[in-house]
Amino acid sequence: MSMGGMIAQTFAINNPSCTLSLISIYSSSGRKEIGPTQELEKLKVPSLIIHGDEDPLVPVAGGKATADAIPNAELMIVKGMGHVLPNLNTYWNEIKAAMINHIGKV
């Protein structure tokens, strides 16, 4: 799992009263020691999972599994996006629009 996704998911799981929504990018649903797939099922907040279809570190299946584990999560697969931030500039407008739309639902 990617570090940012792990932090966001762990915070949302452990602090549901402080979590209005979740946006997770480049992440998967699983850490063996805490079993977040089952924990993610408890989340009751609007969730947007963003993943690139060319991520060499976390396969797109990780993003799909995360979205599948969170009730009513929205999954955004970005064609051609990998895992590194310089690559993000190419897709920023698309990602930004999805994030603004997601935040508007909160």
Image (tube, rainbow, N blue to C red):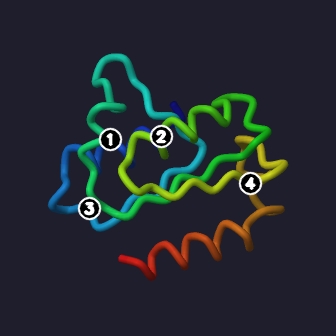
Point out which mark residue 70 bears. Answer: none
Q: What kind of element bears circle 1? A: helix
Point out which mark residue 78 bears. Answer: 4
In primary-sequence order, the first of circles 3 and 4 is: 3
When asked about the image quadrant of residue 20, the answer is bottom left
Point out which mark residue 19 bears. Answer: 3
Callout 2 environment at 10 Å: few (<14), some (14 to 19), or many (20+)? Answer: many
Frontmost of labels 3 and 1 is 1
The residue type indicated by label 2 comes to Thr
Callout 4 environment at 10 Å: few (<14), some (14 to 19), or many (20+)? Answer: some
Query: In the current view of this chain or complex, which residue is farthest to the top?
Result: 32
In primary-sequence order, the first of circles 1 and 2 is: 1
The x and y percentages for residue 36 are 33, 31
The residue type indicated by label 4 comes to Val
Q: Which residue does the image show at 54% across and 39% down from the upper left?
A: 27
Callout 1 environment at 10 Å: few (<14), some (14 to 19), or many (20+)? Answer: many
Determine which residue is flagged by label 1. Answer: 40
In primary-sequence order, the first of circles 3 and 2 is: 3
Determine which residue is flagged by label 2. Answer: 66
Q: CA distance from mark 3 to mark 1?
A: 13 Å
The residue type indicated by label 3 comes to Thr
Q: What kind of element bears circle 2? A: helix
Where 52 sits versus 105, above or below?
Answer: above
Tag 1–tag 2 contact (CB < 8 Å): yes
Q: Which residue does the image show at 19% across and 55% down from the upper left?
A: 16
Frontmost of labels 3 and 2 is 2
Q: CA distance from mark 2 to mark 4?
A: 15 Å
Where 19 sits versus 34, above or below?
Answer: below
The x and y percentages for residue 37 are 36, 32
